[in-house]
Image (tube, rainbow, N blue to C red):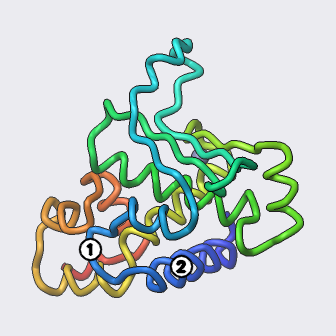
Amino acid sequence: MRQARREYINSLADKIRSYFSNNFPVDLKEIVRKLGGNLAITSLNYLNIEDDEYSEAFITADVEKPFEFRIVVDESVHRNRQNFSIAHELGHLFLHLGYFLDDDKWRESKLKLASHYRKGYGPDELEANEFAAAFLMPKDEYLSKIYDGLEIEQIAEYFGVSVEAAINRGRFLNVFARV
Ligand SMILES: [Zn+2]
């Protein structure tokens, strides 16, 4: 991912999140609701799919009112991973389905009932992960926790993400050399 794209995604995620909330962990259920979406945390086993088709979360643009889109997350994964998945799907919503930012693309997404799955490491997946990390762990808030002297496990807990996600974000923000 080019640096300019990365910075665009970070600033977009920050703008959208801060419009709704500056409390942490981010209340994703509430934000999905305010965006006009439907969130289901449910068993995905009923789909009876093969392992290589499994995805722990997905988003679908919806034509049926009252919802604009639906996000489904597997209930069997840890809550902190669910949070990241929901934010990841919101990344697809804005970056790849056109919601709010590109009316033509969004109309097309709705007509096609376009979907994105949390799976693999393609370019769209990396962008959605970048969006999720920035959405859940904004730079200034992350830095203030580092300066407060919190351990990485405490930072992960504070933001409601996995330790792995908190470490990745810290690497991107280049903060570990300073502590
Ligand atoms: Zn994805």
- For disc 2, the marked residue is 16
The residue sitting at 44% across, 84% down in the picture is 18
Q: CA distance from mark 2 to mark 1?
A: 15 Å
- Of the pair 137 and 167, the residue shown nearer to us: 137
Of the numbered discs 2 and 1, the one sitting upstream in the chain is 2
Q: Position of residue 71 (x, y in %)?
A: 53, 47
Q: Secondary structure at mark 2?
A: helix
Q: Position of residue 84 (x, y in %)?
A: 40, 54
Q: Quadrant of the C terminus?
A: bottom left
Q: Quadrant of residue 49?
A: top right
Q: Amino acid at mark 2?
A: Ile
169 versus 38 height, above or below: below
Q: Amino acid at mark 1?
A: Phe
Pointer 2 and pointer 1: residues touching (CB < 8 Å)? no
Q: Is residue 99 left or right of residue 54?
A: right
Q: Is residue 89 left or right of residue 134?
A: right
- Of the pair 44 and 10, the residue shown nearer to us: 44
Q: Position of residue 166 (x, y in %)?
A: 30, 61
The residue sitting at 53% across, 79% down in the picture is 16
The residue sitting at 10% across, 80% down in the picture is 149
12 versus 127 height, above or below: below
Q: Position of residue 30 (x, y in %)?
A: 39, 66
The residue sitting at 20% across, 80% down in the picture is 146
Which class describes the residues within 10 Å of circle 1: few (<14), some (14-19), or many (20+)?
few
The numbered dot on residue 24 is 1
Q: Is residue 131 left or right of residue 22?
A: right
